[in-house]
């Protein structure tokens, strides 16, 4: 049990990278990148978890109760939102690629270069 | 490299990464343990600064400069997307045909729009007290506007969404964050220092500059998501390929 | 009890991520990604991270899949005209 969350985060990372490397469609590859990204959130929040503790918000609990680590949560939080805008930028690049070359298959695209 | 050879390289890389990662996991502190030196210090610092939501304190006070970096990444990617998805000279704009929406969907959508918008604004405003803040509330508020597209149609969304204003607000949010940081430099010891009075713990005005920076982020994220979705919607629904293709179609 | 919830949420996330990667059609992948976003939001809430859960719910289950679907529609429309 004490290793399972870390290993699951690793699995999500590996399966996402595998998807990106074998993808035949750039939009699909961007989706796989989003999967890979989510592995970092799972890892960060697992590292910060404390058994029996509550969320690090003191608006309705006394300040003496144990809470989980807020630092990793702050890291994950900003990245969730910023990551979505980076995904948008990548999708915009894919749309441009499709306009220019008429395909979104990375193999066909690398053939076009020469 | 052939596809087959590439797959072998990939498999070798994935297996090696998996082995090293699994070995590293055994050295990590156990899941759910009670040893969180950084977390404990961050909680103490947040309580000292009278910010009830520790995460907002970490984001907008303790590591506010980091958040400025994140903000800038967000701003730059929105800028890049707008440049990439702009309508080029050889593309033409075709108004999408109006679509009939079932009456029930229309009623429900129009009812939920103000509710969702209000929830988004509430989540932004209470970022320093309860779970939420500019990042989350911004996305909710921006999404709520798009219920108009689902409940009515695309032209209605376009009429009630002055895109230029949102692009302006996106820049204004980023600028407000930078200027609030400069205020820390002028009135206090360092850039982005928390120079305002800290207020009473667990009230809306507590936390010094935290609510202000939080609001700046809220404005920026709301307008960023609206601008992004606007450009993707325009590309998918309105903008037709180049002029020649348009003639043959 | 807490442990069982965490394990269930973790397995759900792992399953959704795996299906999302092996679903090769990007339009269907967007739907699975939206389910993954939902599963992640549940996991984060169980891990006592409501702030992150809220962001993940809004971004992962709505905004990202919507942008992917719109990109798919744009690229397909382009393809049909060729």
Image (cartoon, coloured by chain):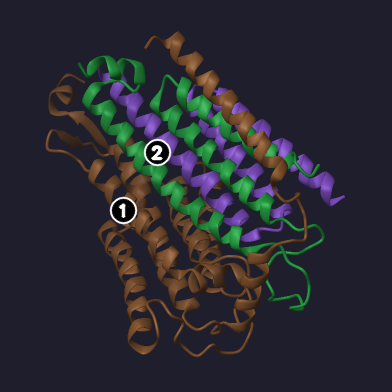
Chain colours: A green, B brown, C purple
Left or right side of A39 for B212? left
Quarter of the image that includes the C terminus of chain B: top left
Kindly report the distance in space between the C-alpha atoms of the residues bearing marks 2 and 1.
35 Å
Residue A3: give x, y in percent of width and height: 75, 41
Answer above or below: position of C81 versus A56: above
What residue did someone put label 2 on? Answer: B99
**Quarter location, residue B245:** top left
Left or right side of A82 for A106? left
- In the image, B224 versus A55, the foreground residue is A55
- Residue C52 visible to an observer of this rendering: yes
What residue did someone put label 1 on? Answer: B76
Answer above or below: position of B188 versus B79: below
Mark 1 closeness class: few <14, some 14–19, many ≥20 residues within 10 Å: some
Quarter of the image that includes the N terminus of chain B: top left
Left or right side of B5 for B79? left
Residue B121: give x, y in percent of width and height: 50, 68
Residue B77: give x, y in percent of width and height: 33, 49
Residue drawn at x 35%, y 24% is C76
- In the image, B35 versus B128, the foreground residue is B35
**SS of the residue at dot 2?**
loop
**SS of the residue at dot 1?**
helix
């Amino acid at each position: 049990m004490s290793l399972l969350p870390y290993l699951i985060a690793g699995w999500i990372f590996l399966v996402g990278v595998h998807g990106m490397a074998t993808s035949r469609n750039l939009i699909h590859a961007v989706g796989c990148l989003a999967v890979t990204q989510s592995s970092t959130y799972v890892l960060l929040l697992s590292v910060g978890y404390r058994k029996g503790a509550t969320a690090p918000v003191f608006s309705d609990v006394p300040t003496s109760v144990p809470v989980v680590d807020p630092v990793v949560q702050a890291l994950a939080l900003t990245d969730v939102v910023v990551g979505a805008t980076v995904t948008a930028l990548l999708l915009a690049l894919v749309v441009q690629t499709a306009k220019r070359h008429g395909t979104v298959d990375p193999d066909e695209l690398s053939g076009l270069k020469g | 490299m052939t596809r087959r050879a590439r797959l072998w390289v990939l498999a070798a890389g994935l297996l090696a990464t998996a082995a090293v990662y699994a070995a590293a996991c055994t050295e990590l502190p156990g899941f759910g343990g009670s040893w969180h030196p950084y977390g404990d210090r961050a909680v103490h610092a947040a309580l000292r600064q009278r910010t009830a939501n520790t995460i907002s304190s970490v984001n907008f006070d303790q590591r506010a400069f980091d958040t400025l970096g994140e903000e800038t990444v967000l701003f730059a990617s929105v800028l890049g997307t707008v440049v990439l998805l702009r309508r080029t000279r050889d593309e033409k704009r075709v108004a999408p045909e109006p679509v009939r929406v079932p009456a029930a969907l229309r009623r429900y959508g129009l009812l939920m729009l103000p509710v969702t918008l209000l929830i988004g604004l509430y989540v932004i405003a209470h970022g320093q007290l309860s779970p939420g803040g500019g990042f989350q509330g911004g996305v909710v508020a921006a999404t709520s506007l798009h219920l108009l597209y689902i409940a009515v149609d695309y032209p209605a969304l376009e009429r009630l969404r002055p895109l230029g204003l949102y692009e302006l607000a996106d820049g204004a949010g980023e600028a407000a964050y930078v200027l609030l940081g400069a205020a820390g430099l002028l009135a206090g010891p360092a850039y982005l220092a928390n120079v305002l009075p800290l207020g009473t713990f667990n009230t809306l005005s507590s936390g010094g500059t935290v609510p202000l920076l939080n609001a700046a982020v809220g404005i920026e994220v709301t307008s960023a998501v609206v601008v992004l979705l606007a450009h993707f919607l325009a590309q998918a629904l309105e903008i037709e390929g180049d002029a020649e293709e348009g003639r043959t179609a | 009890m807490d442990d069982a919830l965490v394990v269930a949420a973790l397995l759900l996330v792992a399953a959704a991520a795996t299906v999302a990667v092996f679903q090769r059609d990007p339009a269907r992948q967007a739907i699975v990604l939206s389910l993954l976003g939902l599963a992640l939001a549940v996991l984060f809430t169980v891990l006592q991270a409501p702030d992150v859960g809220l962001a993940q719910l809004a971004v992962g289950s709505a905004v990202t899949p919507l942008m992917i679907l719109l990109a798919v529609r744009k690229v397909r429309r382009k393809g049909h005209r060729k």
